[in-house]
Amino acid sequence: MPGRRQSVWLVMAAVACGWTGWSGSLLALPVAMLFPALWAMSSSRLVAALVSAGYFLAASRGLPQGVTNFYSSELWPGLLLWIGACLSFVAVHAVAWANQRGYGRGGGPPVRYLAAAVLTGLPPFGITGWAHPLTAAGVLFPGWGWWGLAATAAGLLIMTTRVWPAAAIILGGFWLWSVATWTEPKLLDGWKAVDLEYGQKLGRDASLARHRELIATARKAAGEGIHVVVLPESALGFWTPTVAGLWRDAIRDPHITVIAGAAVVNAVGYDNVLVAISTEEARVLYQERMPVPVSMWQPWLAWTRQGGGARVHLFGSPAVEIGGARIAPLICYEQLILWPVLQSMLQRPDIIVATGNGWWTKGTSIVAIQQASTNAWAKLFDVPVVFAFNT
């Protein structure tokens, strides 16, 4: 009975850990670092699976409502996707679990948790690797860069050992110092992002009137000293030569560049992209590496030769050049998972450009979590960031 009671408390603590750490509050992210300790204290593989499920389901609790909003459907499809997404996270951590009383084959908890953290941070498991505790690095060690990431990883591994209380106290000290001295991620002079409130109509209204309205919005944002204006994901709808010509002719100012989201249709599906428009050119700047699974990326369509859905460019261009600056683009879903941002940071970008079309997240904290995660990475690597979202 005492063992069962302890297991219940561990699961409840994991739920609280996931719920609080991934509430959308940037400074709450380090709470997620308690998860490895709870996982390691599990008395069996089953309990470790339940602890992992509690953490992940609490952290991703906005998914069912988001899916319901996206498809205008009942709640149960969202619940099925929520549970399905949880399975890979739970499976990895359940298989990796080891009893603290003996290291045995495969190493002890630190080695096994390291394997789980790597697997859930990289494809294929990392495709649904939300709520990765490493994201807290930017809150604990702002400006430390890769050294801060290494220190956070070391802290997570120590949290799986018997000396985890000491590690928690040390990490808590860094957390308190960070909270006391916190400043928002810096901005880059000459850049401005524009948030829109078009709801689900954004990108679906291809009328000339809508494009003229967006052009007027972009030109208004390009005030004194601004040379790059960023619009949200999907802002321009389908990217065609006609749309490119309309926008290029309308920019007029040779010193202004507009970065905006669009979709490029091809024979097998479409690419979710960012385009760059100036008086001199209008080109595809970036192809999204990881679209939202199921709602956008539907691999079974390719397997059954039906075609359709967004294409994946898993290890495509992690950074692109524009106007003499190297940018790290992160479109929507890429802000929730680990490997796209780390791949981009290897390129030493000058700025992170984070865009999203979050109308379907109404009633959830998904957009807040996206922005908290991106801000954390921006602080860790001391890189400016701009956000452009549609709600």
Image: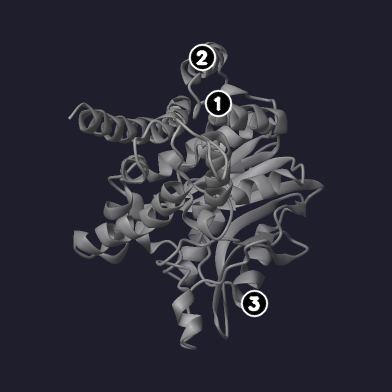
Task: Answer left or right for 125 relative to 319.
Answer: left
Given the image, on which type of amino acid does mark 3 rest? Answer: Pro
Q: Locate the N terminus by quadrant.
A: top left
Q: Is residue 175 visible?
A: yes
Callout 1 secondary element = helix
Q: Are marks 2 and 1 in contact (CB under 8 Å)?
A: yes
Instruction: Identify the disc placed on residue 98.
Output: none
Instruction: Identify the disc placed on residue 166.
Output: 2
Task: Answer left or right for 381 relative to 114.
Answer: right
Separation of disc 1 and disc 3 at Cα?
55 Å
- Quadrant in which residue 193 is drawn: top right
Callout 3 secondary element = helix
Q: Which residue is mark 3?
A: 241
Given the image, on which type of amino acid does mark 1 rest? Answer: Ile
Q: Residues within 10 Å of mark 1 (few under 14, many from 20)?
A: many
- The image's colouring method is one colour
Instruction: State the residue in front, 328 or 173.
Output: 173
User: Vertically, is 176 above or below 33?
Assistant: above
Separation of disc 2 and disc 3 at Cα?
61 Å
Q: Which residue is mark 1?
A: 158
Viewer-side label of 1, 3: 1
Earlier along the polypeptide chain: callout 2 or callout 3? 2
